[in-house]
Image (tube, helix red, strand yellow):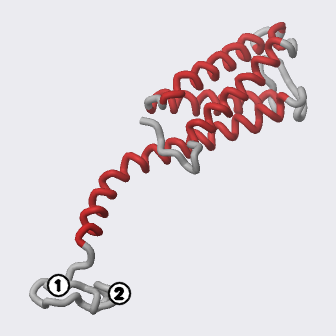
Amino acid sequence: MAPPPCGGHDAGQSWRSTDARDASAHANLYIDGGYRTIPTIGPRFLLLSSGSFALAALLLAGGPLVLRLGAVGVAAGALGGFIMSRTVGVAGFVERGLQPAPQALISLITEIGAIALLTAWEVMLRRSQAVPARAGVAVLLTARGPQPPRGTGRAAAGDCHDWRACPAV
């Protein structure tokens, strides 16, 4: 089930574009940035960009919970790899600051954005699934309008803004 639109654009759509941009940055580093020649790291970049593109494509129509959790895992793993490559290193590979530019900054922003947007998407999905039950009750309550207490013939104080406009029973 796709989430309801939020201002004409939903969090799922935002995540897919964010994830595709992150996958594109990693694919660019793999193909043009020379990362394919780095043992261990090169194949991981290829796997990350392929997996991110695949998840974005699978979630186009709104995917099940397991795909959304997988997407959060991929984004969190990419962010963890980014942080590790700048601190302790990954398989002997260490980078400094936001180099290579601009891919490092793009990756950092899109990975954090993907996690935030996936979380927002999940919250929207859960809220949209809870709305029909609440909406049905609200329709029942508002369709009848304010009702006077039984047996009094008039609405009690506070039940109607103007007691003269309230129907007598």
Amino acid found under the numbered disc labelled 1: Pro
Task: Judge left or right: residue 87 versus residue 52.
Answer: right
Residue neighbourhood size for the residue with mark 1, other residues' Cα within 10 Å, grouped as few (<14), some (14–19), many (≥20): few
For the N terminus, the quadrant is: top left
Residue 87 to residue 122: above or below? above
**Percent position of residue 167, x then y:** 21, 84
Q: Residue at x 52, y 22 (%)?
A: 58
Which is nearer the eye, 111 or 42? 111
For the C terminus, the quadrant is: bottom left
Q: Are marks 1 and 2 in contact (CB under 8 Å)?
A: no
**Tag of residue 161:** 2
Which is nearer the eye, 44 or 157? 157
Residue 127 to residue 158: above or below? above
**Percent position of residue 142, x then y:** 29, 69
Between the C-alphas of marks 1 and 2, the distance is 15 Å
**Secondary structure under the numbered disc 1 in the rendered image:** loop
Residue neighbourhood size for the residue with mark 2, other residues' Cα within 10 Å, grouped as few (<14), some (14–19), many (≥20): few
Between discs 1 and 2, the one toward the N terminus: 1
Amino acid found under the numbered disc labelled 2: His
Residue 153 to residue 115: above or below? below
Task: Judge left or right: residue 32 versus residue 9.
Answer: right
Q: Residue at x 27, y 61 (%)?
A: 137
**Percent position of residue 102, x then y:** 87, 30
Number of residue marks: 2
Quadrant in the picture for residue 12: top right
**Secondary structure under the numbered disc 2 in the rendered image:** loop
Q: Which residue is mark 1?
A: 149
**Percent position of residue 26, x then y:** 76, 21
Task: Judge left or right: residue 91 versus residue 48.
Answer: right
